[in-house]
Image (cartoon, rainbow, N blue to C red):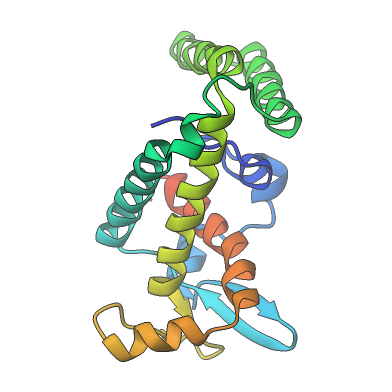
Amino acid sequence: MAETTTEVEAKIEDEGNPLEAFLEGTPSLTEIMDGKGVPFWVDDRQFYIRPPTTEEYDQALMVQELAHARAMSQPEVQKLRDLSVSDGERQVLEARIAIAERAYEAAEDKRTKELIAERLAFLRRQLETRTRADELADRYAVLKRDRWLTFCLLCDADGKQMFDPNNPEDLERWERLPMRVKDEARLAIWEVLAAVRNAPFD
């Protein structure tokens, strides 16, 4: 699957190398697991996104891949395969390349340099070959992943899970949840995923 490079997400998760400036304000995985999760607010109401279980994490990846495949199969998206990415997308890729280049120069051991070199080669290929179709399909796939995770992980101010994916009535309640809450939850989702993906060994 083509790499996700949404502008906001690129700032906070970079394939296992999230920007340090962002993570300085992000709870560690231990803090997330010991507490209610990552908080966010809509107006004066507080919510939390709890960390996913391994099964939920794996299912989220499947949701993302299936959504990407569906999007790429759409005729409207296929028409974009000959178009280059948007200016914003190109800027994100160029910024990632610059970050990787600095990391390569700063790396001291051979293995780390090899891994960063592989990352750089991948990003440079993306800059040359990525299309508007890839960009659109990725954005849609990440949105579908985030919606699914929000449904599974959203908790109220007391840390109580708000929806049960196996309860049909909760599906109806989910549809009535204001879209503002679903949209605001996405940054908390990304914070949780960044913490889960980059958690060190105890």
Image coordinates for residue 63, horizontal then vertical, percent: 33, 53
Q: Is residue 191 above or below residue 1?
A: below
Which quadrant of the figure contains the N terminus? top left
Q: Is residue 8 left or right of residue 160?
A: right
What residue is drawn where x is 51% and y is 31%?
134
What residue is drawn where x is 61% and y is 17%?
127
Image coordinates for residue 79, horizontal then vertical, percent: 52, 29
What residue is drawn where x is 56% and y is 24%?
131
How many numbered dots are placed on residues in this image? 0
What residue is drawn where x is 50% and y is 39%?
76
Q: Quadrant of residue 167?
A: bottom left
Q: Is residue 104 left or right of residue 197?
A: right
Image coordinates for residue 183, horizontal then vertical, percent: 61, 67
Along the viewing direction, whichever of 149 and 52 lies nearer the viewer: 149
Along the viewing direction, whichever of 157 and 60 lies nearer the viewer: 60
Q: Is residue 118 above or below residue 81?
A: above
Image coordinates for residue 21, horizontal then vertical, percent: 72, 44
Q: Is residue 3 left or right of residue 73?
A: right
